[in-house]
Amino acid sequence: MPARRRTRDEPDAGILDAAEPVEEYEENPVDEDEGYQDEDYRDEDYDVPRRLNAMTAGEAGLRHIAELTSRQTEGVTLVKPQDDGWLVGVEVVEDRRIPSSGDILALYEAELDEEGNLLSYRRLRRYRRGSGDLGEAAR
């Protein structure tokens, strides 16, 4: 006979039957087909898109650039909040060479809205790996 889970509202019996398996108390019961069973645990904002933080904005920008360019990304180089979203810089391998010091990289910029949707993107520049980058000081 399968054991059933005890809910919060059931009183403790105080004495355990040795034949019954002991189960952990389930803090947040969820039915996979119907969602949350207990209204106390329902998140009122569940269907509302959440605002991004710097970490999630960077991940979203990286994912968008990788999908659009179909190229391998090296990493996020910039995450900057804007009035209505985020600006994300992503470094991409445009052309693989042997040795890898000859790889051609590109710096892309993605503009995201507050929910992480891509508004625009552009390639800022291309350069050879290891060519030395002065970053913002070069501008």
Image (spheres, grey):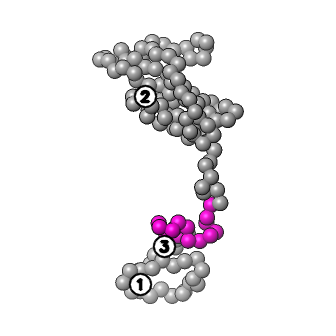
Task: Indicate the position of residue 132 as horizontal and vertical percent values.
Answer: 48, 13
Decide if residue 115 is on the left or right side of residue 62.
Answer: right
Q: How many marks?
A: 3
Q: Nearer the viewer, mark 1 or mark 2?
A: 2
Q: Residue furthest left?
A: 98
Looking at the rendered structure, the kind of residue marked 1 is: Glu
Label whose residue precedes the other's in the sequence (1 or 2) = 1
Which of the two residues, 74 or 88, is positioned nearer the viewer here?
88
Q: Which residue is mark 1?
A: 20
Local secondary structure at mark 1: loop
Q: Quadrant of residue 27?
A: bottom right
The residue range painted magenta reads 28-43
Q: Quadrant of residue 129?
A: top left
* Marks 3/1: CA–CA distance: 13 Å
Instruction: For residue 79, say whether it is visible.
Output: no
Q: Tag on residue 83?
A: none
Q: Which residue is mark 2?
A: 69
